[in-house]
Image: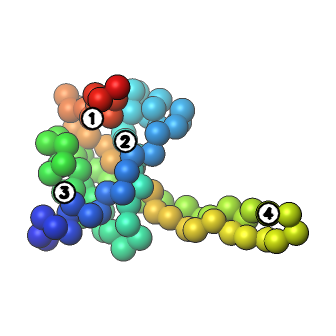
């Protein structure tokens, strides 16, 4: 896998109450990833970008919600989420800039 591909795999972190608790208790972080990313690509991308060691990756395909705008029905886009578990002693700090 080339570095260009790995730099494009992760789209951003998923920061919510649930993912924050998972990060604090189990060392598991959630990321929004491209639709065709594999577990191996996601793990290597996290290792490359954050300089940590990955223990495991789980991937979830999230279905887009159905929404209304007046009488018009619409649907949000489907997306892919990856839960990345780090080896003990490693962590990622997303709030470094704040």
Q: In this view, does 73 lie above or below 7?
A: below
Q: Nearer the viewer, mark 4 or mark 3?
A: 4
Q: Which residue is drawn at 68% across and 61% down?
A: 65
Is the C-beta separation of discs 4 and 1 under 8 Å? Answer: no
- The answer to whether residue 58 of the structure is visible from this angle is no
Q: Which residue is drawn at 40% across and 27% down?
A: 25
Q: On the image, numbered disc 4 is attached to which residue?
A: 69
Please report whichever mark, 4 or 1, sits nearer to the chain's N-terminal start. Answer: 4
| Count of labels in the image | 4
Percent x, y of residue 24: 39, 27
- Of the image marks 4 and 3, the number of the one nearer the N terminus: 3
The answer to which quarter of the image holds residue 59 is: bottom left
Residue corresponding to mark 1: 92
> What percent of the width, then of the height, locates residue 18?
53, 36
Q: Label 2: how many residues lie within 10 Å, few (<14), some (14-19) or many (20+)?
A: many
Question: Distance from label 2 to label 1 (Cα)?
Answer: 8 Å
Nearer mark to the viewer, of 4 and 1: 4
Q: In the rendered structure, which disc, 2 or 4, sits on the residue that comes first in sequence?
A: 2
- Residue 89 coordinates in the image, percent (x, y): 19, 28
Mark 3 or 1, nearer chain start: 3
């Amino acid at each position: 896998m080339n570095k260009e591909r790995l730099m494009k795999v992760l789209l951003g972190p998923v920061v919510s109450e649930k993912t924050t608790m998972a990060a604090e208790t189990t060392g598991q972080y959630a990321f929004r990833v491209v639709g065709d990313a594999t577990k191996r690509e996601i793990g290597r991308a996290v290792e490359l970008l954050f300089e940590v060691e990955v223990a495991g990756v789980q991937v979830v395909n999230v279905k887009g919600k159905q929404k209304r705008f007046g009488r018009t029905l619409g649907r949000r886009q489907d997306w892919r989420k990856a839960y990345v578990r780090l080896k003990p002693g490693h962590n990622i700090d997303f709030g470094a800039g704040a």
